[in-house]
Image (cartoon, rainbow, N blue to C red):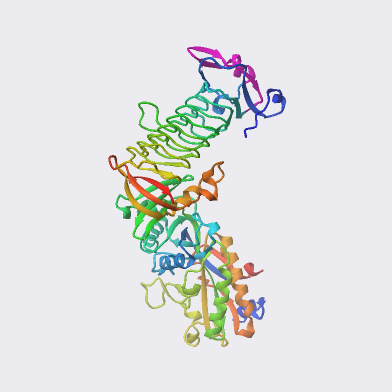
Amino acid sequence: MDQVMAEREIMNINGVSIDQTFAEAFPMKATRVIITAQNLKWAYHAAQSMTGFATSVIACGCEAGVERELDPSETPDGRPGVAVMIFAMGGKSLAKQVETRVGQCVLTSPTSALFAGVEGGEIPLGRNLRFFGDGFQIAKRIDGKRYWRIPVMDGEFLCEEATGMTQAIGGGNFLILAESQPQALAACEAAVEAMRKIPNVITPFPGGVVRSGSKVGARKYKSLNASTNDAFCPTLKGETQSDLGPEIESVMEIVIDGLADEDIKKAMRAGIEAACSLGVTNGIRRISAGNYGGKLGPFLFHLHEIMA
Amino acid sequence: MVRFVHPTDQESTMSPLTFSLKFPLRQRLDVSPLVPDRLVGKSRAELAAIQLQYGNRKVPLGEFFTIGGSDPETIHLTGSPKLDFIGRGMTRGTIEVEGEAGAYLGMQMRGGRLRISGSTGPYAACELRGGIVEVGGNAGDWLGAALPGNKKGMSDGVVIVKGNAGNRAGDHMRRGAILIEGNAGAYLGARMTAGTVAVRGEVGCHAGYAMRRGTLLLYRPLAAILPTFNDCGTHTLGFLPLLLRGFEGLDTFFATPVARRARVRRLVGDLSALGKGEILLVL
């Protein structure tokens, strides 16, 4: 334990110690779509609906989130929009998730239009949604891309034929350990805000933060493939092999999905810097990461390397 | 304005390959061999020896043209209303014609860019399969149409006409865009299977006759609407600005922000055919 404590002391930012550990992440497949609407408010309505119940592949089938807002000059149809990213464990499940989500949440959302955000065309959008047009739909090829005009009650739903699919990484993360729950949450909010500026990443949990970090498998219930990360549960300090010192009362995690190694590193760095900027005076004591001893995935993000 | 390289410039490295007519033509001349695909790697002597169909005879190219320049990917040609099949089947490179062109300009072209400063005859861009055809003057009848007896007209690419187009522009058209900045004759977009024809000026009678699918985008009120078209009312269509932005980078009115309009009256037809086509009248 002394050695562990000594390692923790190696790096310290603004009084917050950075554990010498790594976040463990796994390969995923990802896509991006662009949702535009009459105004940003309605683009967000569609995007938030589409990315609802998409926090973790453990039970949601995919992980999704709004990557960033798009200025009208950045969108294909010149209207305000948002870029949404969706991550899943495989190409087929990704395609299925995208199909059901855009069909129920974007097609249905007033004034929306839907475009590809990744080159390729492996993930159908209008290719399947067009059937909603019941034969009244119209295809248009514009600048080499195929679009569908699907008649709907508010006018026409304009939708690109398909979007692309790309290799991605899921489960990049870090933990913020604080003296109290409000302080942990404040640091998380600062971190998520900073990470929103980083392209190619999303933080899929509610508000970007997860308070129920998990460990692989379960101690008691063998059928579970994930259960509470008891080593980081502050109420269990005297009951389990805890990783928490007496000063820690609350731990929260930020999970990051990104298109590439570099994107996740950039996001982790921005997030950890923002959290640490609050410093020990605001009760932020440690930054750690979800290290599962190699059981979860092949991508390792060492905190000390990222913050070096 | 097309820059025309004088034959004396021929010594400069990789200047456009130029073919300057030595005398006014008396017969029609088929210049379909003069496309980048077929001229790469040919020496000046080989170029001069290419046999061209002139009326009912085959005559070597050197008899008609002074050859200059060296870059076969960019061809400059003196125009004449008797030059037929300019750019036929070309797949890449650029052909620029200073002056007029005859019939079948850019016929079955697959790629590249073909630009003429003057007017062209009938069947320009007929059965076009890709690339960009720009006509500085007027185009004759059957612009972007199918050859007689064929049922598949232009199937991709963009045709820009700065002047007027004759009758039957876009006949049997399947895909791609025809952009006419002047007026269009009768039977615009007749028997269209799909694609887009936009006209800034006046349009003759029977527009959209027997069209199955596709879009006629008209910037002036239509004098006579076929009785087989039904009115769907006025709408703001989100795809229109997207469609017109797709022409960005091309030298045409339709690529300008002024042309980017979304408010249209939508007529659907031709109900005597499949009836999935539309005439969009810009408001």
Q: Choose between A239 and A36: the one closer to the eye.
A: A36
Residue B179 drawn at (x, y percent) = 48, 40
Residue B152: x %, y % from top left: 38, 33
Q: Is residue B276 left or right of residue A243?
A: left
Quadrant of res B198? top left
Which residue is at a point 47% across and 48% down the rendered structure image? B243
Residue A103 occupies quadrant: bottom left
Image check: A175 left or right of A92?
right
Which range is magenta? B43-71
Res A233 visible: yes
Q: Is residue B50 magenta?
A: yes
Quarter of the image containing the N terminus of chain B? Answer: top right
**In the image as oriented, which residue stretches furthest toward the front?**
B223
Q: Which residue is nearer to you in this view: A53 or A176?
A: A53
**Quadrant assignment, res B60:** top right
Q: Can the viewer see residue A243? A: no
